[in-house]
Amino acid sequence: QLHVPQSMPVQEDNPAKRPRLERKGVVASETLAASNSDIYRQEFFEYRPSIKVIDCTIRDGGLMNKWQFTDDFVRAVYTACVQAGIDYMEIGYFTSEKYFKRGEVGPWRFCATEDLKRIVGENKTGLKLSAMADIGRIDPCDIPMKKDSLLDLVRVACYAHQIDEAIELANLCLERGYEVSINLMAVAKVPLVEIDACLAKLKSCKCQYFYLADSFGSLYGEQVRLLIRRYVAALPHMEIGLHGHHNQQLGVANSIDAIMEGANVVDGSIMGLGRGAGNTPTENLLCFLKNPKFKLRPALEVIKAHIQPLADTMEWGPSIPYLITGARNLHPRDAMAWQAAGKKLDGVGFLDFINAKEKQPKPVAGLKPGGRAAPPQPL
């Protein structure tokens, strides 16, 4: 669970103070339900035009197959994103090639310009392209000027202890002409005082977006609301986003909570495609967001033609083992190993396994087995 220091009271959740959809900048959808029922009244069909969707199908889905999608598959997802009115397609990672071998991973681990052109041409569409950069896996010499790249947005992924490096990389990408986001990962493992320290450092950063990443799918609505309010208040010059995982099948609900608290960007992947329990399904977001620019049918068409056939050969999505790791705020690696061993349906066995593992004595920091001091390790 999210750690809340006793010295820092949780902000009161006052519904009257939430950024409601009826506020300035909100317009009514022309498509209203025919029913006269009160729950279908007009205010529930209003929308905030500033809300954007980033689809991560290729980048996050590639964690399962080392980004070795066929060109036809990637092109079909790209076309669906264009036709569905999605704002950004995160087509992969932005990585220096010295860190991975092309024979072992697909092209979407790198997002080189020649690979992008093979799929999108010059991308003369309203869809912007995004790629994620990991700290320590992209060298400055491998980041071209924006005018020489098809990428529009670089999303810098970091943990709390890497925030200084993330800001440095973000500033470099800004100088080279890109839109930039910093995605703070695994926040459910981070005390609020450390999150606040990160936010304080970000006040001087000029990147356009800052993200709450629910890395283990462990956050509940009240935690998402608390954090998004904190982010919005601390960083009024940035747009706040949420990247949800579906371990507890709360990706959609948490995205809605984030939007209601003022987040303007939400992530999804088509049919939830992503490692482990997967991500917030993009098609669910398209159903919720009433902006008429968003179209559901293209997402359903690519599911039928490409994503569902992939699901017949590659497994992802919610399960009892992923539910347990999400509820316990644990990395899903144990659940992935459990399911890979053919025990997906043995939820009782997995719960017993996790309970037994958590009862094991934790190793003393700085000591090797046998009691000898170990050198300090990076976090």
Image (spheres, rainbow, N blue to C red):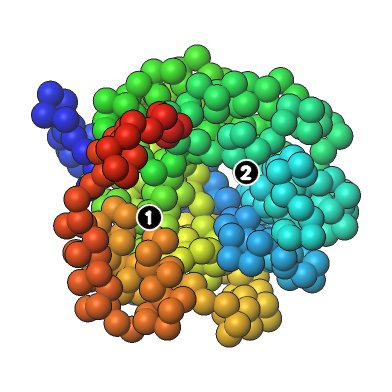
In the displayed structure, 69 sits above or below 94; it is below
Does residue 74 appear in the picture of this structure?
yes
Place of residue 67 in the rendered image (x, y in percent of width and height, measured from the top left):
68, 61
Does residue 284 appear left or right of residue 66 in this picture? left
- Please tell me in which quadrant of the rendered image residue 75 appears: bottom right
- Residue labelled with disc 1: 331
**Which residue occupies the foreground of this view, 183 or 18?**
183
Place of residue 336 in the rendered image (x, y in percent of width and height, measured from the top left):
43, 68
Within-10-Å neighbours for mark 1: few <14, some 14–19, many 20+: some
SS at circle 2: strand
Does residue 67 appear left or right of residue 190 in this picture? right
**Marked residue nearer the N-terminal end (2 or 1):** 2
**Which residue occupies the foreground of this view, 151 or 13?**
151
In the displayed structure, 279 sits above or below 214; it is below
Q: Are marks 2 and 1 in contact (CB under 8 Å)?
A: no
Q: How many marks?
A: 2
In the displayed structure, 148 sits above or below 353; it is above
SS at circle 1: loop
Within-10-Å neighbours for mark 2: few <14, some 14–19, many 20+: many
- Residue labelled with disc 2: 132
In the displayed structure, 45 sits above or below 335; it is above
Q: Residue furthest left?
A: 6
Q: Residue at x 65, y 70 (%)?
A: 298
Does residue 190 appear in the picture of this structure?
no
Q: Residue at x 35, y 21 (%)?
A: 197
Place of residue 224 in the rendered image (x, y in percent of width and height, measured from the top left):
30, 45
Q: Residue at x 51, y 52 (%)?
A: 267
**Which residue occupies the foreground of this view, 168 or 56?**
168
Place of residue 251 in the rendered image (x, y in percent of width and height, measured from the top left):
39, 59
Amino acid type of the residue tagged 1 in the rendering: His
- Please tell me in which quadrant of the rendered image residue 334 appears: bottom left
